[in-house]
């Protein structure tokens, strides 16, 4: 592309020559690179980080160096400095540099695969938890287990409720003890306000139900009968908010979950690719097309979740129209 073709993107008021420019470059070089991508980093990207003062604001928007460590663009190229796209807090000067950064992020995300099993700690069976608490008798447990085996379906808790007349509240409390997590309520469940926290696909496929955001920094996330720490961690990293997981009684969870699936979510594109290079290509293309002010990549189970921000996010939860999600899965064929 010709050098001047993107001149319109450049801020004409910025001094590109002379002392000021050198000074700014010097400041830029003196500041170590952006911190590595962390869950607690503001998704607002360069603008948020640049809030320290006018000088740093100028630096961060106009004279940031390309975030690709392998970038070989000369300073002439950097001058036409497009301000976007930003990926994981770092600006990239060209599609090739965006691809390099996406590729590195993809490698980082795929490295963690297989650890899900390790995080699955052994848990005391639900029936034993309930018996230890004196909530059921050994006879009740035996009968419920027999019924479950004969039917070949249904969770033990459901059999205890339906066949043995145990209260749902006790079963949910026992699940909470089994998972060492709180039992959560559905008070003030504002479904529409919570849909920007995660794509509908994850609510559906992983049975995760955002319940509410507290104090602008904490998400309460409900599950029906087992926690999913991978989902919780992924949402934590993407949103920068801490996720507190808990269990919700089935009779409350099921209708609330159905309601959430019918709510409006941010736009999402679902893509399946055959290889990692193909994933890099798809993700890079999406970033280059939208030129987001920030974007992040997080893996949740087998799904690579790219979120792109059109504009700076102001509150703890992004506006639905502000973001665009892309979920990419790499097929094993
Ligand atoms: Zn570059």
Image (cartoon, rainbow, N blue to C red):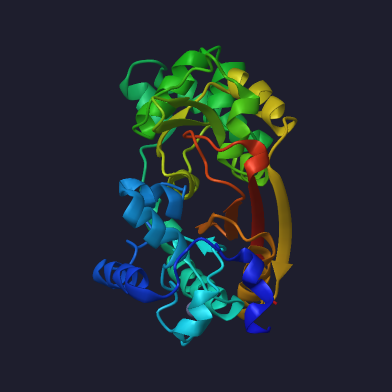
Q: Position of residue 159 (x, y in %)?
A: 58, 24
Viewport quadrant of the C terminus: bottom right
The answer to whether residue 22 shows anywhere in this view is yes
Q: Position of residue 148 (x, y in %)?
A: 60, 33
Residue visible at 45% across and 76% down?
Answer: 68
Q: Position of residue 324 (x, y in %)?
A: 66, 50
- Classify residue 46 by image quadrant: bottom left
Viewport quadrant of the N terminus: bottom right
Indicate left or right for 326 with 197 as reference: right
Residue most toward the front? 18
**Most foreground residue, 20 or 130:** 20
Note whether 56 is above or below 133 in the view shown: below
The number of numbered discs placed on residues in the rendered structure image is: 0
**Most foreground residue, 254 or 94:** 94
Residue most toward the left? 30
Residue visible at 71% across and 28% down?
Answer: 258
Residue visible at 58% across and 60% down?
Answer: 302
Residue visible at 58% across and 80% down?
Answer: 96
- Classify residue 30 by image quadrant: bottom left
**Most foreground residue, 71 or 107:** 71
Indicate left or right for 192 with 240 as reference: right
Note whether 21 is above or below 46 in the view shown: below
Indicate left or right for 100 with 21 as reference: right
**Most foreground residue, 4 or 323:** 4
Q: Position of residue 57 (x, y in %)?
A: 38, 54
Indicate left or right for 275 with 75 as reference: right
The answer to whether residue 40 shows anywhere in this view is no
């Amino acid at each position: 592309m010709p050098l001047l073709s993107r001149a319109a993107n450049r801020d004409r008021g910025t001094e590109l020559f002379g002392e000021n420019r050198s000074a700014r470059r010097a400041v830029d070089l003196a500041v170590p690179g952006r911190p590595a991508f962390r869950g607690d980093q503001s998704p607002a990207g360069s603008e948020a980080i640049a809030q320290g003062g006018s000088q740093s604001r100028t630096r961060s928007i106009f004279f940031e160096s390309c975030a690709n460590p392998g970038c070989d663009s000369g300073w002439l190229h950097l001058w036409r400095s497009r301000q976007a796209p930003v990926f994981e807090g770092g600006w990239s000067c060209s599609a090739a540099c965006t691809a390099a950064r996406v590729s590195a992020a993809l490698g980082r995300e795929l490295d963690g695969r297989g650890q899900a099993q390790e995080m699955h700690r052994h848990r005391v069976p639900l029936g034993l938890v309930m018996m230890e608490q004196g909530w059921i008798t050994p006879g009740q447990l035996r009968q419920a287990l027999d019924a479950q085996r004969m039917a070949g379906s249904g969770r033990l808790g459901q059999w205890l409720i339906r066949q043995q007349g145990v209260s749902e509240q006790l079963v949910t409390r026992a699940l909470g003890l089994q998972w060492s997590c709180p039992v959560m309520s559905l008070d003030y469940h504002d479904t529409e306000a919570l849909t920007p926290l995660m794509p509908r696909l994850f609510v559906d496929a992983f049975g995760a139900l955002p319940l509410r955001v507290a104090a602008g920094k904490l998400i309460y996330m409900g599950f029906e009968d087992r926690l999913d720490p991978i989902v919780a961690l992924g949402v934590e990293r993407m949103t920068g908010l801490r996720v507190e997981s808990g269990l919700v009684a089935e009779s409350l969870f099921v209708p609330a979950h159905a309601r959430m699936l019918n709510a409006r979510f941010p736009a999402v594109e679902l893509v399946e690719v055959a290889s990692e290079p193909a994933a890099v290509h798809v993700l890079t293309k999406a970033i280059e097309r939208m030129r987001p002010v920030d974007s992040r990549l997080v893996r949740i189970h087998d799904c690579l979740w790219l979120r792109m921000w059109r504009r700076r996010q102001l509150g703890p939860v992004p506006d639905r129209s502000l973001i665009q999600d892309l979920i990419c899965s790499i097929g094993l064929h």
